[in-house]
Image (cartoon, rainbow, N blue to C red):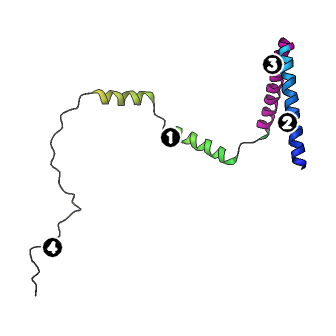
Amino acid sequence: MGQSKLSILVYALIGLAAVGIVSQLLTNTASFFTNILIMLGVGAALFGIFYLFIQKRRAPSNDMKKYKKAVKQSKAKYKSHPSNMQAKAAKKHQPASIKKKTSRRAGSHLRVIDGNKSKKKRPG
C-alpha cells in the first residue's frame, strides 16, 4: 500500500513539472531557453570536473601496463622501413624472369621399402 502512494506522489510531481514547463514555455519563451542553456552548461562543467578527478584517481591497472608494453615491443619487432617497402613493391611490378626447369628428386632421407605385394594370399 505504501508503494502505491509513493507512485501516485511521483506521478503528481511529474505532472506538475510538465505543467510548469509548458506554462513557462508559453509565457516567457526567451528566459525559458536561457535557463535551459545555463542548466546544460553547468551540468556539462560539473561532469567535466568530476570526470577529470575520477580519471586522475584511477591508476592504470597492471594488466593494462603489460598490454601497452607488449604492443610497443610488437611494433618495434615488426616495424618495416619505408625503403624496404618500396623495394618489395618494385619487385612485384617487375616481369617474371624465365625459370630453369629443375628435376625434383626425392629427398635422401626417403627410401623405398620392398613389401610382399607380388605374393598373393591363396585360400588354403
Which residue is painted at 80% across and 30% down in the image? 47
Q: CA distance from mark 3 to mark 2?
A: 26 Å
Q: Is residue 67 left or right of residue 100?
A: right
**First in sequence: mark 2 or mark 4?**
2
Which element carries disc 2, helix, strand or loop? helix
Other-residue count near label 2 (Cα within 10 Å), few / some / many at <14 / 14–19 / ≥20: few
Image spot of residue 36 (x, y percent) = 82, 20
Instruction: State whether the magenta stretch is mostly helix, strand or loop.
Output: helix
Image coordinates of residue 94 in percent, x first then y, are 27, 27
Disc 1 versus disc 4: distance between alpha carbons? 52 Å
Label 1 with label 4: CB-CB less than 8 Å: no
Q: Secondary structure at mark 1?
A: helix
Q: Which mark is residue 37?
A: 3
In front here: 58 or 51? 51
Q: Judge the density around disc 3: few (<14), some (14-19), many (≥20) Cα neighbours within 10 Å.
A: few
- Measured along the vertical axis of the image, is residue 109 above or below residue 78? below
Mark 2 to mark 1 CA distance (whole Å) = 63 Å
Res. 11 mark? 2
Q: Where residue 50 sits: x, y (%)?
A: 81, 33
Mark positioned earlier in the residue sequence (2 or 1): 2
Amino acid identity at mark 3: Leu
Q: Nearer the viewer, mark 2 or mark 4?
A: 2
Measured in 3D between alpha carbons, the distance from the residue under mark 3 to the one under mark 1, in whole angstroms, is: 52 Å
- The stretch in magenta equals 27-56
Marks 3 and 2: CB-CB under 8 Å? no
The residue pinned by badge 1 equals: 77
Q: Is residue 48 magenta?
A: yes
Figure quadrant of residue 121:
bottom left
Q: Are marks 2 and 4 in contact (CB under 8 Å)?
A: no
Would you say 83 lies left or right of 94 here?
right
Residue 34 visible, this angle: no
Disc on the earlier residue, 4 or 3: 3
